[in-house]
Image (cartoon, coloured by chain):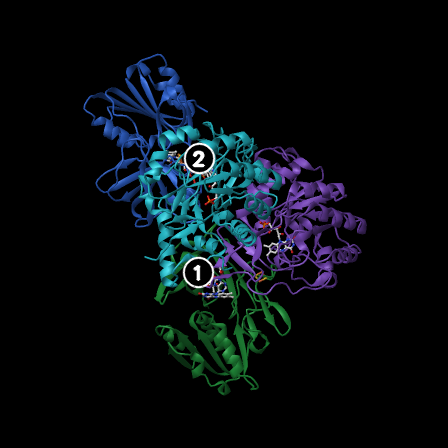
Chain colours: A blue, B green, C purple, D cyan
Amino acid sequence: MAKIISNKYLGQDIHVMKIEGNFKGEMGQFYMVRSWDNYPVLSRPLSIHDIDDEGISFLYRVVGDGTKNFSKLEVNDEIKLEGPYGNGFPKVEGKVLLVGGGMGVAPLYLTAKRVSKLEDVEKLDVFMGFREKEMLKGEYEKYADNVHINVGGIITDDVDVDKYDYIFTCGPEIMMEKLVKMAKGKDTKVYVSIEKRMACGIGACLVCTCKTKDGNKKTCKDGPVFLGEDVFYE
Amino acid sequence: MAKIISNKYLGQDIHVMKIEGNFKGEMGQFYMVRSWDNYPVLSRPLSIHDIDDEGISFLYRVVGDGTKNFSKLEVNDEIKLEGPYGNGFPKVEGKVLLVGGGMGVAPLYLTAKRVSKLEDVEKLDVFMGFREKEMLKGEYEKYADNVHINVGGIITDDVDVDKYDYIFTCGPEIMMEKLVKMAKGKDTKVYVSIEKRMACGIGACLVCTCKTKDGNKKTCKDGPVFLGEDVFYE
Amino acid sequence: MSNLEVKFKDIKFKNPVIMASGTFGFGREYNEIYDIEKLGGISTKGLTINKKEGNDGIRIWETSSGIMNSVGLENPGIKGFIENDMKFLNDLDLVTIVNIGGATLQDYIDAVKLISKENVDIIELNISCPNVKAGGMAFGIEKESARKIVRIIRKTTSLPLVVKLSPNARNIVEIAKVCEEEGADGVSLVNTFKAMAIDINKRKNIFNNTYAGLSGPAIKPIALRMVHEVSKAVNIPIMAMGGITNYKDALEFIMAGATCIHVGTANFINPKIGLEIIKGIDEYMERENIKSLDEIRGII
Amino acid sequence: MSNLEVKFKDIKFKNPVIMASGTFGFGREYNEIYDIEKLGGISTKGLTINKKEGNDGIRIWETSSGIMNSVGLENPGIKGFIENDMKFLNDLDLVTIVNIGGATLQDYIDAVKLISKENVDIIELNISCPNVKAGGMAFGIEKESARKIVRIIRKTTSLPLVVKLSPNARNIVEIAKVCEEEGADGVSLVNTFKAMAIDINKRKNIFNNTYAGLSGPAIKPIALRMVHEVSKAVNIPIMAMGGITNYKDALEFIMAGATCIHVGTANFINPKIGLEIIKGIDEYMERENIKSLDEIRGII
Ligand SMILES: Cc1cc2nc3c(=O)[nH]c(=O)nc-3n(C[C@H](O)[C@H](O)[C@H](O)COP(=O)(O)OP(=O)(O)OC[C@H]3O[C@@H](n4cnc5c(N)ncnc54)[C@H](O)[C@@H]3O)c2cc1C
Ligand SMILES: Cc1cc2nc3c(=O)[nH]c(=O)nc-3n(C[C@H](O)[C@H](O)[C@H](O)COP(=O)(O)OP(=O)(O)OC[C@H]3O[C@@H](n4cnc5c(N)ncnc54)[C@H](O)[C@@H]3O)c2cc1C
Ligand SMILES: Cc1cc2nc3c(=O)[nH]c(=O)nc-3n(C[C@H](O)[C@H](O)[C@H](O)COP(=O)(O)O)c2cc1C
Ligand SMILES: Cc1cc2nc3c(=O)[nH]c(=O)nc-3n(C[C@H](O)[C@H](O)[C@H](O)COP(=O)(O)O)c2cc1C
Ligand code: FES
Ligand code: FES
């Protein structure tokens, strides 16, 4: 049981909530979160958006009953979270681009923060696509060399794969698959963060299968981050 | 959908909550109340504790998930209520005693208020039994000639049936049955308010049966108030 | 406003939303809350040839997302119903389905004979009530006993006959087929699931009858599967129910093959739920540009 | 600390709380979260003679108070299990139940033969999985097919044999009796209920297999009734499951006649639920001055 420090509405159905405590977590990892007893049955996977001395933050979009429940939480309300789970993004070097589409931007804040501190990273760009309006730009600029935002268009159109050694991406599969294709045969390595429905979140129940070239993988445990070229997209 | 004006804890697991709106209701009637969407399935029957220009009040004890949910409501939170349902206490004359045991005191406040305004009522006493400590005395004194409270004992021991033309009682069945027995063969008429598990609250589903000398009655529609001598107690 | 009309054999419903037996009385109480003529129809509380007092003890218990009931067919008897409620229902513009129960075959025959003299739209033969000691569900568990009762009742009445099936049947699909073979005009499913609760502090069963009938959202996924299986196996129309609480649930059942749907437990969540479901279906049809529910019925 | 020990035939469990097949993997992942030796036992993910990839498409869907799953027995095969997980389990002080599935009778025989060479406490014969196209539940629906497989498997292994029953069986009580007659050491029930969900916007079934298995709190009242019925009909011990989420649920099943209980879906609500249930039972026994669970087993 932990306590809500803040829970703010940012627009476009997106909220950011901060929870008090000393939480662990690497970039790209997630927690299984619930703020209710009985309904819904399952906890909800949320990527770590940020971690600091006060607590942990999640950026989430209201899509159904679970996230609606999150959006109603007020300061000091209680919330349960289990984690950190999953593998997270690898520690890399050279020129790095983060590409987020919609709620896929959520894990990229902690990722930007951590990547920017990696010794051998020469350059860090963040590209984000939103449907309606620009947001969060200032936040990400704290850590990125260059933050580019596309509103209403197709963010991949703006990416020049050749400029980067690594691309970390999170968002709709169609967007991530596009980036993987764009990098095909090039030196750029694309890592994708996959979203699948989850139950246990730790690798025990096999409901979150991601089909890859090496066979079935557990998105919650072997992922959510996979080398983009290994994944069979849906 | 209505809004909470206030929701106060009074001690002994008892809360009083006030809801904004122009609500109708007679003494002894109840509403079916819910402050949740999915869980629990059924709404909860609560007697009208008071009605004034601002809204309606319920006095309730936390016993399970439904009432726990009520106790968490804060000012401006939303709540749904359907009613008023049930028959309520009859309009009478002469000397009247109200006897409440535990949460059975809930409907007796509106009842005291309304009875005290009946033209031909000569006298109105209120006797209340609590397990741990006295409460609400001052409130009821606004309308009663005499408020007597028994803590930890048996409230019926303090009642002199002969002094009254009518006794209205609400509380544990064992207490109400006792009063009915004490009044047996006398002129005093005892009306009891029965609590049964309910689903529809309006007389359609037949889950709230009260066995009486006239056969099965629907507690929600024919009751909750019955002439004490007609009821078969459990 | 979309066209929500459906035809169940030759019977026209203004919309597919019917209130389920036992949860809506004979409509009077809900009619004080809203205009129940807006509904497609109602199915009455289960009636038996003679008045019944029902079961003793606790009659309702909540589960995680359902309720268990053990009313035990308390009802005024067919005569009582005809005297007090038949006219009220006949005066309303909605399809009246009379739900009939019984302890013995003769009970059923007598009840059906008596009600067949009245102006009733459909008889719903309840061979699936888990809350009575004799008869009730017993007729609806095994194929042969179901066949026998449907055959005889089919001869007893010329009113449209719908048989209400039990999810506790050995094989609900086979029972539905038997109903079709014996000339039933349709089937309705599901009735409640035989279920149980125990008070661990008293170390006692909650219900005097030990078992009671589970209904509500909890059973929806199973009921939907059963409706789908039955709809693939028979050609007579289906009235579907089991945990329907919103228009989405209702549409799932229609897509699984139901002609109309019954709403039971959800009336206790929101007394006006029937209207909300009708509205929801209407808006969905508008949104999806569906002219008739026939377009989506049974498409899975 | 009360004495929570139970004996299932000759097998001693330090407490009656077992983690259900398919929800706990082979224990490794949960062991990183808490010390799983505190449990009474675990039942492994269902194993088949050969590795299986499981079902395509969505594998999990939530219902009002349950989940539907369509994993389709994805597993590493018996050999993979023996190589990678057997030792891990053998090193732990808890009862290891190996859950075995299959598409054909021969699959089952081969799997049971292979696993019988290992240090396993109990074989749980899963003839009730609704998520595989061939075999699985098919064996557990009709009495005669159940009799055949149990008879053959009984001859194939000398390990304690528990048969896992399907709530979708024609008559679960009869299947339990057949298991007893054929020499099973116990039965476990229930597996998941065959259920369905539809996406009304896509007008498509959610699961590629159309049907999936419902588990969780939603099914508890029905599962409890089944356990009660079975416990009155057979003399072999019962492992009970279906929606158990707290110690009260667990005690209801024990009072209905179960020797021990499995916890499945509730692990997803709270990964440490097993410990909480053990603690709750312990405190209840203390409070009620119960020296052994035998005092309350089957008292309803
Ligand atoms: C590893 C991981 C990290 C995620 N991080 C974030 C994040 O940081 N911010 C954010 O807004 N969302 C994130 N999501 C998606 C988020 O989990 C879903 O939006 C959320 O579960 C929806 O729950 P709901 O009850 O509001 O919606 P409903 O649609 O009612 O949920 C129904 C069921 O589907 C599941 N579900 C629905 N959408 C998704 C989805 N996209 N991915 C996985 N399961 C889903 C739910 O968990 C639930 O079991 C993440 C998903 C995964 C797998
Ligand atoms: C006509 C009437 C008027 C009432 N007025 C009041 C009141 O003014 N203040 C107050 O505190 N309580 C009142 N009660 C009792 C109140 O309804 C229950 O305490 C409440 O329903 C408990 O719900 P729960 O979820 O907290 O408890 P749980 O025990 O979890 O409830 C489980 C189920 O049992 C039912 N139930 C539990 N206790 C009772 C009970 N005593 N009577 C009827 N059903 C019960 C619930 O409605 C629910 O369906 C009244 C009951 C009736 C019938
Ligand atoms: C309180 C109650 C009483 C019921 N009485 C009857 C009845 O008399 N006859 C009948 O056929 N079904 C009866 N049912 C079953 C319902 O009609 C319906 O089949 C079942 O509840 C499933 O639908 P639901 O989940 O929408 O409630 C009753 C159900 C409830 C909850
Ligand atoms: C994701 C999942 C996978 C399952 N896999 C198996 C399995 O491999 N073998 C088996 O016998 N039962 C399997 N089950 C059924 C459970 O063991 C259990 O019988 C059922 O879920 C009911 O218990 P519960 O309500 O506590 O979950 C599975 C259940 C779930 C939810
Ligand atoms: S969610 Fe259980 S294995 Fe991934
Ligand atoms: S609660 Fe339905 S008749 Fe009384």
**Residue closest to the eye, D160 or A131:** D160
Q: Position of residue D13 (x, y in %)?
A: 39, 48
Which residue corresponds to mark 1?
D295
Q: Is any atom of residue B117 visible in this view?
A: no
The answer to whether residue C118 is left or right of residue D276 is right
The answer to whether residue B135 is left or right of residue B43 is left
Q: Secondary structure at mark 2?
A: loop
Mark number for residue D116?
A: 2
Asked if the beta carbon under badge 1 is closer than 8 A to the nearest atom of ligand 4, the reply is no
Q: Position of residue D189 (x, y in %)?
A: 51, 46
Circle 1 chain: D
Residue depicted at 44% across the width and 60% down the height: D295
Mark 2, Cα crowd under 10 Å, few <14 / some 14-19 / many 20+, is some
Q: Secondary structure at mark 1?
A: helix
Q: Position of residue B80 (x, y in %)?
A: 48, 55
Q: Position of residue D191 (x, y in %)?
A: 51, 42
Q: Is any atom of residue A44 visible in this view?
A: yes
